[in-house]
Image (cartoon, rainbow, N blue to C red):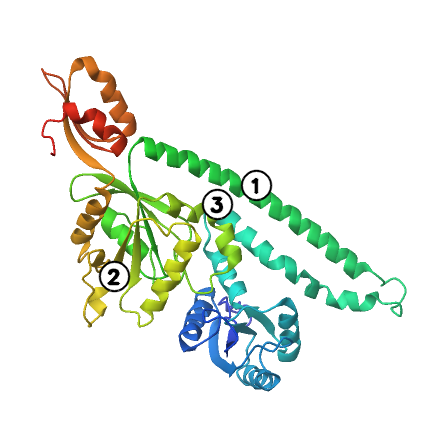
Amino acid sequence: MRGTKAIQDTTVKKERAALAGLAAASMDQDERSDEVSMDELWQLALTAGAEPVCTVLQTRDKPDPHSFLGMGKVTELKDLIESQECDLAIFDNDLTPSQARVLEEALGVRVLDRTGLILDIFAQRAHTKEGKLQVELAQYRYLLPRLTGMWTHLKRQAGTSAPIGTRGPGETQLETDRRHIRRRIQKLAEELEQVRRVRGTQRRRRERNALPVVALVGYTNAGKSTLLNTLTGDSIQTGDRLFDTLDTTTRRLDLSEGGQALLSDTVGFIRKLPTELVDAFKATLEELTYADLLLHVIDISNPDRETQARVVDELIDRLGAGQTPCLKVYNKCDAYFGRLPAGEDEICVCARTGEGTNALLYAIGRKLSGELTRMELSIPYGKTALVERLRREANVLDLEYTEDGVSVLAVVRPALRAELREYEVHPHG
């Protein structure tokens, strides 16, 4: 009708993606593709906002140095891309810059490797200033060796037979971009070093307050944030998505024996986690090396849980926290129908319903008790300087001024324990 405004469709069209992977005998076992890692790539593509529509998995002795996949499989992938009207191809493995260029020319669509896909997800999910700095640093480190391909069209014009006026600008612009990115990388690294110093100050303050730190670690989507919410009564937003948590969250945790600790949630791990991300997130992930206890959260309902747990353990070692005491927390036990683990340092829970969390709190307290001691003290008024020291260096649970002195209930570290023995009301042997 005349005068009627047309209703515009504002729905954002999802990019249709073809997924590809290579299982080559010459590749490291953790780097090659299989059905499990391809399923994971499908979930990563969905998380990034793409619409995966088909997959291609090739098995061969080793990657083709030119095109990664064999040319026959590249042709098969191109036919799939055309028939499914795909906008991009996502590879489950890391590609060299030259392989990515060859594949883009052969397939006629944009090509993204697993690292580029994960970096894109992190860029979408980072909300704090620190998280954005870390992701940007990782992206620039990933981009720097790939700049050459972006200027190939100009470099081709730089030969002696090129038309006048077109010689050299590609290489000039390439070097300009490289210098700009290197300066940006240096600036981001300096800003993140400042973040690290601030974290160090916060860490020393926690140590003075004698609050032990418990860090949640685990494979992405294992349920760490849900467990933090259940244990602390918080309401951090959670979702059934990969990498739902990027920014570290720390909350107070009340233990079953009356003590307190700080519980920190960390970014989820994943196989083939990009080196650029591990390096960029060191300011956050190094918190693991200062934790008094790790809670390794494992999705027991996932058929691939053993491989996922191994990936996490290897990354913990890589970050220098392999010697930190650890409890294995098997989550989603309500969705598992096999025999549940029952080892000394193994706890089964359902973070969503709270089942098993009382046993977990008791286990946390038991693990921390080797470091911390709960003491009931009666300190004479002539020694009130000790009371002030307790306020600074211990976790004071209760304090009361009586006729005989100051009655204090506190959780103390080993350094204070010996000095306070003579004031203990009920000595423990």
Whole-angstrom CA distance, mark 1 to mark 2, is 39 Å
Please give the residue where the numbered disc 1 appears in the rendered image: 190
On residue 46, the disc is none
**Above or below for 181 versus 115:** above
Kind of residue at disc 1: Glu
User: Which residue corresponds to the image point at 54% horizontal and 54% vertical from the top-left?
Assistant: 138
- From the viewer's perspective, is the residue at label 2 or at label 3 nearer? 2
The residue lying at 49 percent from left, 62 percent from top is 118
Quick one: label 1 or label 3, which is nearer the N terminus? 3
Q: Position of residue 47 (x, y in %)?
A: 43, 65
Q: Is residue 326 among what the camera can see?
A: yes
Splitting the image into 4 quarters, where does residue 404 fall? top left
Q: Mark 3 or mark 2, which is nearer the start of the sequence?
A: 3
Q: CA distance from mark 2 to mark 3?
A: 30 Å
Disc 2 is placed on an element classified as strand
Residue on which disc 3 sits? 130
Q: Are marks 2 and 3 in contact (CB under 8 Å)?
A: no
| Residues at marks 1 and 3, CA–CA distance in whole angstroms | 12 Å
What SS does tag 3 mark? Answer: helix
Q: Residue furthest top?
A: 382
User: Residue 328 falls in which quadrant of the image?
Assistant: bottom left
Judge whether 125 appears above or below 14 on screen: above
Inspect the image, locate mark 3, and give the three-letter code of the amino acid beneath it: Glu
Q: Nearer the viewer, residue 409 or 49?
A: 409
* Element type at mark 1: helix
Q: Amino acid at mark 2?
A: Tyr
Q: Which mark is residue 330?
A: 2
10 Å neighbourhood of mark 1: few (<14), some, or many (≥20)? few
Percent across and percent down for residue 255 are 20, 43
Give the image location of residue 288, x and y in percent: 38, 48
